[in-house]
Image (cartoon, coloured by chain):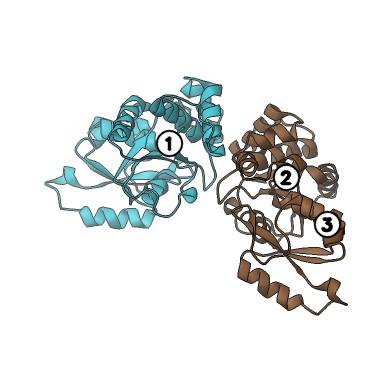
Chain colours: A cyan, B brown
Amino acid sequence: MNLRVVLTPGELRPGEVAGACVFVIDILRATTTMCAALHHGAKAIIPVTGIDEAREVAARFEGEGEGEGERPMLAGERGADPVPGFDLGNSPGEMTAAAVAGRLLVMTTTNGTRALRAVAQAASVHPLAAVNFSAAVQRARSVRQDGGRVVVVCAGMVGQPSREDAYCAGRFGRDVVGSAGGAGLSDQTRWCLDLAEEFGDDWYAALMASTAGRKLSEHGYAEDVRVAG
Amino acid sequence: MNLRVVLTPGELRPGEVAGACVFVIDILRATTTMCAALHHGAKAIIPVTGIDEAREVAARFEGEGEGEGERPMLAGERGADPVPGFDLGNSPGEMTAAAVAGRLLVMTTTNGTRALRAVAQAASVHPLAAVNFSAAVQRARSVRQDGGRVVVVCAGMVGQPSREDAYCAGRFGRDVVGSAGGAGLSDQTRWCLDLAEEFGDDWYAALMASTAGRKLSEHGYAEDVRVAG
């Protein structure tokens, strides 16, 4: 499969995303939540690493817009739960049009926003999840047809590869490239494709078979797993 | 599976190997080669990261032994091939009794010796490969029965998880713990166990299905893959 897949941001080689079209996967839940926010009219999302940094960045944009509606909103989680004092957590269900339309979001999550920050040198960066899967596949195909490079970066979980992101990467790679074959597959890409084969088109089964899916469900966020799949 | 498996040294949490009994896997080929050297009478192996460091460490031990036979030997590889000027490469077949019996080896390889250096805080460190598998399983069981902690650290390939090491870790975990079950399995451990199930007891098939196995075979080291499996 002639497509580079990286299982954690730590595995990125220096400079390898420069000039590339990058798809970042943290399907449970950051990239699913981001897609929901953008779909419901959020103007933009600024990913930041820390909570203090989120407040600083939001303050920098304070008053730059026209009226109260332009104030940046703080969104994110720590340990899956919303950050005290923030406007929004990291649940796709929170990202309604009433909440986010026309607003700028400053967002920090444990894994997803770190991955987004790690690819800041890319030519373009897209969140990837089930909810925007077909559109993302089309975009990646089009970039490749125009001679561009596509890199898929999984967020993983606290620096370690995670199954739900790898499954999404495997499906994505298969659909973008149009074939799951190739003798030169890396061991990581092979894992992704094996997972895509194991769970087929069943997003929900794949998500529930992951550590993140299990933990979110136990922690009161079962609906988020359902929405993500 | 109540046993910690780490797919690359970069995934180690700070301090987590301190006081633990650690098994390091770089089955193609560093830990297989180390087992061969120790089996054929090498006195000890000092893993170092760089080529210059290897020469410095060897010079430090020069003349400390009794006679010429006590001079440290330099061993290792870069890009799979022996390092120019070194006494030995990284092939298990080179580690004959005639070459290494009674000798101290200073060794540097691309992945394996880095993994060994990353676990220097462990209570004890063992190379793990197919060639010492049964003895290693017994040792790990005994440590756990005495209340000790066992951590398995895969070397991976240039900072990325590798299939042949993960397969070895999966077989090891299954045999040490005595069961492959458990709802709380991490996604990485599950990958290892899936590989152990996929390839069963067929070391050679698992090794040849990995990037490292394929590359070594293409690069003139097919016999090393056979010996390792």
Count of numbered labels shown in the rendering: 3
Q: In this rendering, would B229 be left or right of B190?
A: right
Q: Local crowd at mark 2 within 10 Å, few (<14), some, or many (≥20)? A: many
Dot 1: chain letter: A
Q: Which residue bears the numbered disc 1?
A: A3
Quadrant hosting residue B60:
bottom right
Residue for point 32% across, 34% down: A144
Which circle, 2 or 1, is nearer the viewer?
2
Q: Which residue bears the numbered disc 2?
A: B224
Numbered mark located on residue B97 in the image: none
Quick check: do tags 2 and 1 share a chain? Answer: no
Element carrying mark 1: loop
Mark 3: amino acid? Leu
Element carrying mark 2: helix
Element carrying mark 3: helix
For marks 1 and 3, give the CA distance: 41 Å
Furthest residue to the bottom?
Answer: B63
Quick check: do tags 2 and 3 share a chain? Answer: yes
Quick check: do tags 1 and 3 share a chain? Answer: no
- The answer to whether residue A219 is visible is no
Q: A89 or B188: nearer the eye?
A: B188
Mark 2: amino acid? Asp
Quadrant hosting residue A177:
top left
